[in-house]
Image (cartoon, coloured by chain):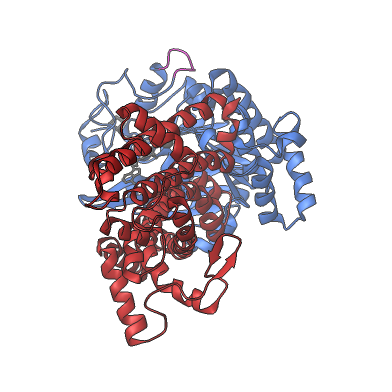
Chain colours: A blue, B red
């Protein structure tokens, strides 16, 4: 069916203008998990672009496919998960076809990652200095001394006091917030064009979260790094991201500029999502405002995945799967904005 | 840290007391030592005299106290069989057992660790499967069968290695070593291999399980995301995080190996403590049996304590725990 073949390109002005030099361009990505009881489509035909220096927030309930999207870009999907369709370009180079060896050369150099739990992200048996120098030398070929200097610069840049002493300390000697700064320094070590940040503040104290997101935003703007910021927290999105993509059951249902999506959501799911957040800092674990729960991947309904919970659903919603189409100032995958639900 | 050390120490003492109690009970119940030591024609007077000299006329508690006191000084009495000092007899046999166990341990680490890594990171390959399968045989074959098999193949058929004995030894102080002579080195190969076979399997399976676990951890995922190549991921980041349990188990098993060496030493007629013990059992030479028990237990307890301290040295997280 033509409708399902291709999502239209994201027309957001910044991205469109910078389209040619996008640091990340994902088109029609599909990720599958072959299981004993059939093939689960975890990510279904998702497209996105991120321009240099731009932060794209990716939001959605637990299990919506946010992390899998990030891992697919990094080439770190765990077997049996596999990219079953679509293309991924990072800094202009197609990477979804690369072998593991070639991917290893792209990771860290062209794209970095920050994961949720800074307490477990660092090797407990090596000092921070060893891990930084290892990463820097791997990508730059600098001498040990030069790499150490670069490590000091990086630690200073991510706001770690007394970096010289800190270099010879082990991860357990750092607080959670400080460790996440180290993780950010490691991700930035080779000045990648793109950073995938998967829930970078979720595991941290509330008081620390704002500092880390502010740091991330500053670094991204300073270095013109594109960031895919995966989070539950609409507050983080509102403060940090430039654009936002809303995911539901492995599909992208709405995307647009942050303020447009927050104040003028077009997709019924996004509307419920925004209404469900009394203050922006509530987390979107589950959506109490809308009855029901996100369907499991093996029980995704025909047509629009949201139709069992949607107050506006019509017969067409149970037959066909809507794709992103212009809706207000955003893009939404909903027949209300694309020919009606009958 | 101090509280920890005191606790460990109290623990060790309790274990040693329990073991010496068992050893002591062997003394009492294997038979009347007086009957064992004197011949049938001895007079009642001689009997009573010996009874007093051995302290057997004292209360049970007092006797146990004396036993523990003497044992703590290294005095386990004299052998019933040849009237020699028991501790000296054991000390003479100890180097043979110790060298056997150390060589077996080194073999098990040198062979077991790479096998564990390979079976973990090349899970689907035929050679990983083959190693897995062989390792099941390794655990299920009894030690004496392995020993006899090795003798049959490598000394009877191929004639590569001696089938029994320790070869020539060199005396260094009170220590006699077989590792410095050619015949000594040839002689230790088969018994050490036989003793290490079970151990290789243990090390391999432990390394494999730990590797699989560590490879799933976040810091490995993050290391991959930083572009660290697979070799460095496996051998630098992952393996090092597996080594602590391996060190622990290896050290703990040394005690076990010394005990297990009993069978190997019997099969290969290896002149170690185990063989001494077996001979003591045949002659109901109780002081040697009791001393052997206490010394093996002491080695266990010492190793345990050393392991706990090594742990704190290897893992920087535990080093900081005293704060
Ligand atoms: N190894 C796997 N096998 C099968 N399904 C998986 C696997 N890993 C993740 N999934 C599915 O992929 C979906 C998306 O997961 P994820 O991207 O982690 O969600 P989130 O949006 O919370 O980050 C989930 O529904 C999950 O059940
Ligand atoms: S397509 Fe239909 S079911 Fe899906 S969100 Fe729009 S109205 Fe609701
Ligand atoms: Mg997630």
Position of A82 compared to A180: left or right?
left
Name the residue: 29% across, 70% down.
B146
Q: Single out the residue that lies furthest toward the top.
A: A278
Count how many numbered circles sit on residues in the image: 0
Q: Position of residue A175 (x, y in %)?
A: 60, 27
Residue B111: % across, % down: 45, 65
Question: Between residues B125 and B150, which one lies in front from this camera angle?
Answer: B150
Image position of A211 with respect to B243: above or below? above
Ligand 3, seen in the image, is in the quarter at: top left
Closer-to-camera residue (A248/A99): A99
Q: Is residue A280 magenta?
A: yes
Quarter location, residue A275: top left
Judged left or right of residue B46, residue B97 is right
Query: Along the line of sight, which residue is nearer the eye, B216 or A298?
Result: B216
Q: Residue at x 64, y 26 (%)?
A: A214
Task: Answer yes or no: is residue B124 visible.
Answer: no
Farthest-out residue, bottom: B158
Corner quadrant of residue B274:
bottom left
Quadrant location of the C terminus of chain A?
top left
Judged by its main secondary structure, the magenta piece is loop
- Residue at 45% from the left image edge and 38% from the top image edge: B70
User: Where does the magenta region start and end?
Assistant: A277-282
- Residue sitting nearer the eye, A23 or B241: B241
Residue B246 showing in the rendered view: yes
């Amino acid at each position: 069916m033509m409708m399902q073949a291709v999502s239209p390109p994201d027309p957001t002005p910044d991205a469109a203008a910078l389209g040619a030099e996008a640091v990340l361009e994902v088109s029609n990505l599909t990720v599958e998990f072959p299981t004993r009881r059939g093939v689960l489509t975890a990510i279904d035909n998702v497209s996105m672009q991120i321009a240099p220096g731009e932060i794209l927030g990716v939001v959605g309930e637990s299990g919506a496919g946010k992390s899998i999207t990030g891992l697919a870009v990094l080439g770190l999907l765990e077997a049996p998960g596999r990219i079953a369709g679509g293309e991924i370009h990072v800094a202009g180079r197609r990477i979804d076809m690369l072998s593991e060896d070639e991917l290893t050369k792209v990771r860290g150099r062209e794209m970095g990652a920050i994961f949720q739990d800074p307490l477990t992200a660092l090797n407990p048996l090596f000092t921070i200095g060893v891990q930084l120098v290892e990463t820097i030398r791997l990508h730059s070929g600098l001498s040990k001394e030069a790499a150490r200097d670069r490590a000091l610069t990086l630690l200073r840049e991510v706001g770690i006091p007394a970096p010289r002493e800190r270099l010879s300390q082990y991860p357990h000697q750092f607080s959670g917030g400080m460790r996440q700064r180290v993780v950010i320094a490691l991700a930035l070590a080779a000045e990648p064009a793109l950073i995938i940040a998967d829930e970078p503040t979720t595991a941290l104290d509330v008081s620390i979260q704002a500092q880390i997101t502010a740091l991330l935003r500053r670094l991204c703007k300073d270095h013109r790094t594109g960031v895919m910021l995966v989070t539950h927290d609409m507050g983080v999105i509102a403060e940090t991201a430039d654009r936002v993509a809303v995911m539901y059951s492995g599909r992208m249902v709405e995307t647009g500029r942050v303020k447009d999506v927050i104040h003028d959501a077009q997709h019924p799911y996004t509307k419920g999502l925004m209404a469900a957040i009394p203050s922006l800092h509530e987390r979107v674990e589950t959506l109490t405002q809308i009855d029901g729960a996100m369907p499991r991947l093996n029980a995704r309904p025909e047509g629009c995945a949201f139709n069992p919970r949607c107050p506006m659903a019509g017969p067409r919603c149970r037959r066909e799967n809507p794709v992103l189409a212009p809706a207000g100032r955003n893009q939404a995958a909903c027949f209300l904005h694309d020919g009606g639900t009958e | 840290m101090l509280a920890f050390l005191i606790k460990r120490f109290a623990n060790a003492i309790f274990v040693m007391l329990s073991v010496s109690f068992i050893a002591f009970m062997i003394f009492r119940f294997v038979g009347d030592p007086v009957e064992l030591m004197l011949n049938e024609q001895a007079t009642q007077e001689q009997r009573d005299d010996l009874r007093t000299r051995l302290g057997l006329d004292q209360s049970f508690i007092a006797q146990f106290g004396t036993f523990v006191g003497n044992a703590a000084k290294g005095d386990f009495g004299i052998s019933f069989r040849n009237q020699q000092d028991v501790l000296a007899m054991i000390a003479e046999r100890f180097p043979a057992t110790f060298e056997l166990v150390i060589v077996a341990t080194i073999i098990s680490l040198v062979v077991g660790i790479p096998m564990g890594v390979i079976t973990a990171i090349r899970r689907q390959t035929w050679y990983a499967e083959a190693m897995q399968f062989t390792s099941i045989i390794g655990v299920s074959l009894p030690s004496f069968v392995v020993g006899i098999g090795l003798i049959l193949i490598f000394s009877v058929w191929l004639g590569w290695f001696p089938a029994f004995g320790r070869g020539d030894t060199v005396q260094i102080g009170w220590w006699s070593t077989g590792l410095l002579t050619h015949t000594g080195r040839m002689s230790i190969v088969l018994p050490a291999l036989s003793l290490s076979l079970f151990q290789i399997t243990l090390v391999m399976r432990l390394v494999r399980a730990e590797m699989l676990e560590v490879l799933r951890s976040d810091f490995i995922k993050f290391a991959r995301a930083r572009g660290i190549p697979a070799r460095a991921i496996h051998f630098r980041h992952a393996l090092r995080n597996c080594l602590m349990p391996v060190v622990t188990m290896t050290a703990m098993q040394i005690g076990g190996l010394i005990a297990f060496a009993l069978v190997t030493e019997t099969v290969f007629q290896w002149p170690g403590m185990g063989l001494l013990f077996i001979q003591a059992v045949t002659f109901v030479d109780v002081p040697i049996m009791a001393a052997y028990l206490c010394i093996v237990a002491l080695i266990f307890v010492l190793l345990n304590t050393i392991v706990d301290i090594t742990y704190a040295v290897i893992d920087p997280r535990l080093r900081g725990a005293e704060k």
